[in-house]
Structure formats: structure tokens, C-alpha cells
Amino acid sequence: MPTANQSKSIGKINPTSIPIPTPKMIFFDIDDTLSRNGEIDPHNKATLEAIAKSNLDIKLVISTGRSKAILPLDILALLEAGVLDAVICMNGQYSFNNQRIISDYPLSIEQATTIAELCQKSKLVYKFDAESQIVWSDEHEWQHRYHDKIKSCSIIDPEYCKFNTVYQCSVFFDNQQDKMQDVNFAQHNLKLVHWHESVGDILTSDASKARGILDVCQHFNINAADCMAFGDGLNDLEMFDLVGFAVAMGDAKDELKQRANLITGTIEEQGIQAVLTPIMQA
């Protein structure tokens, strides 16, 4: 497979237009890559199960910005069944498998407090992701957009981050002018990464899915250059730069498509199957 630092060319929508290497491990984003509206597409579920049952010896790993507390139940079921080998969540801040935590990078109290103060100055509602809870600064409509675990793990406590371990913050915008353009995150060793037009994650500058991938690669003794990744959003940029072969979904952000080895179809166009079926049939 290509090295992680090798320049990457853009493939066409038809994946058969370029050679597709067989990876040792594949990383999948969840939302709008494996799943739509919080539910895994049946074709994608069947493909993951088929690879897990095959003799290909390919590790399958989730790489998502979602909090561990609100991972979709269908994804967790695949982990429990042994179809998935590990999960990287909270943009690389927390990685685990069925046996143990592989790595975690909690925010310091000082970092978390700084993030809360920046959001408060901008008069925006925010939430912190803890290991088993999501903690809101105030009521917000997005509380009702998460799946059915939300009621059991969601609390409102603007002081929570001062006394408890948290991993990342999500901040919610009502319009374009609210997107904290005037905040110099870099001076606080922080960054804002948008994964939705009205939501962004605030993380430390060195946090990314790529860091979690390196930890999981070390755990399984696999080189990142021998891995493949599927994604669609801006929080997948570092992941695409790291792995040997990166596949952007058909409705991925343009910036991500520019980093991809290959652009495939959307979920509805069975874009993942277009890439992985030839590997399974080889």
C-alpha cells in the first residue's frame, strides 16, 4: 500500500478505475459513512459481517467523533458480536475494544475550563463528553436529536468540567455569525472542527482521529500505511492523511475529497460495497 506521506491522487466515482489494495485494517466513520440518521445501512452491516466471517484477516474499526455515551446501539452490537475489533470515539480521544481501554486522552481541568469560558463569552450552548455521560451547559434542541440512550446519559451541569473527567466539547451554533470566528483557539492550544453546519467540536490542537488510529495500530501491531479509511467529514482529514488508502464518500466535504485516494458513491449508492466487494471476491 502507499506510504502515509505519499501524495494522493483523486479517484473517480467508479472505484474500479484504480487499483484497490487489500488492507490489514479498515477504519469507518459512522454518520453519513456507515449510517444515515443514526442507523447503520443494511448493506453496510452485511458487508462488515461478511468481512469478519471471511478468511481475509482484516480488522474492522470504528473511527467517530461521537461520544462513547451516544454510540449507536447497532454499532455496539457489532462490537459485542466480534464483527468490529475496536472503536475509536470522541475524535481519537478514547479508544477501546471488548476487553479494555486501548488509549484515552482526557482534557485537563484547565483546558476544559478554558473551553467553557470561550463558549460562555460567545453566549453559546455547549456540551462536554465524559466516558459515560454527555453534560450540557443548558437546554438545547440538539438534546433531542440523539438516539434512545440520550435520556439515561444526558445531564445539565455547567460546572461539571471543573470536577470531572471530560474528553471533548461540542458547541452549538444558531447561525453563521455564531461560529466563533473571532476566537483565537490556537493561543489556547485548542482547535474548532466543524462536523455539521451548526455544530463543532473543540479539542486540543493535537487531538484527532489519527492519534486514535495510531494507538489502535500499535495495539494490533499493524502499520497505518497498511490501513484503509472511509469518511465524509472534516474531522476525517487527519485520518485520511495518515492511512495508506483513503476513500471519501460521494457526499463527503470537498476538502476531504481532495485528500482521498478514491471517491466512491454515497451510502444509498452502496459506495462502501463498490470498494470492498472486489477485495472480498479477489
Image (cartoon, helix red, strand yellow):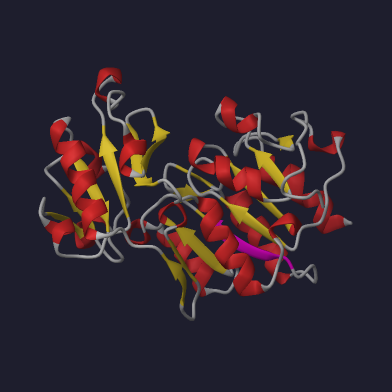
- Report if residue 200 is visible in the image: no
Q: Up-down: is 234 above or below 159? A: above
Whole-percent x, y for residue 38 in the image: 42, 47
Q: Main secondary structure of the magenta part?
A: strand
Magenta residues (range)? 58-62
For residue 24, what is the image quadrant?
Answer: bottom right
Residue at 68% x, 41% y: name it.
247
Q: Up-down: is 85 above or below 213? A: below
Q: Nearer the viewer, residue 207 or 240?
A: 207
- Report if residue 195 is visible in the image: yes
Whole-percent x, y for residue 195 in the image: 42, 37
For residue 104, what is the image quadrant?
Answer: bottom left
* 77 magenta-colored: no
70 sits to left or right of 42: left
Image quadrant occupied by the C terminus: bottom right
Residue at 83% x, 46% y: name it.
20
Marker count (numbered): 0
Q: Up-down: is 24 above or below 144? A: below
Residue at 76% x, 69% y: name it.
54
60 sits to left or right of 93: right
**Which residue appears farthest toward the front when viewing the image?**
187
Whole-percent x, y for residue 210 in the image: 56, 52
**Which residue appears farthest toward the bottom when viewing the image?**
99
Whole-percent x, y for residue 149 in the image: 28, 59
Q: Nearer the viewer, residue 148 or 88?
A: 88
Residue at 52% x, 69% y: name it.
79
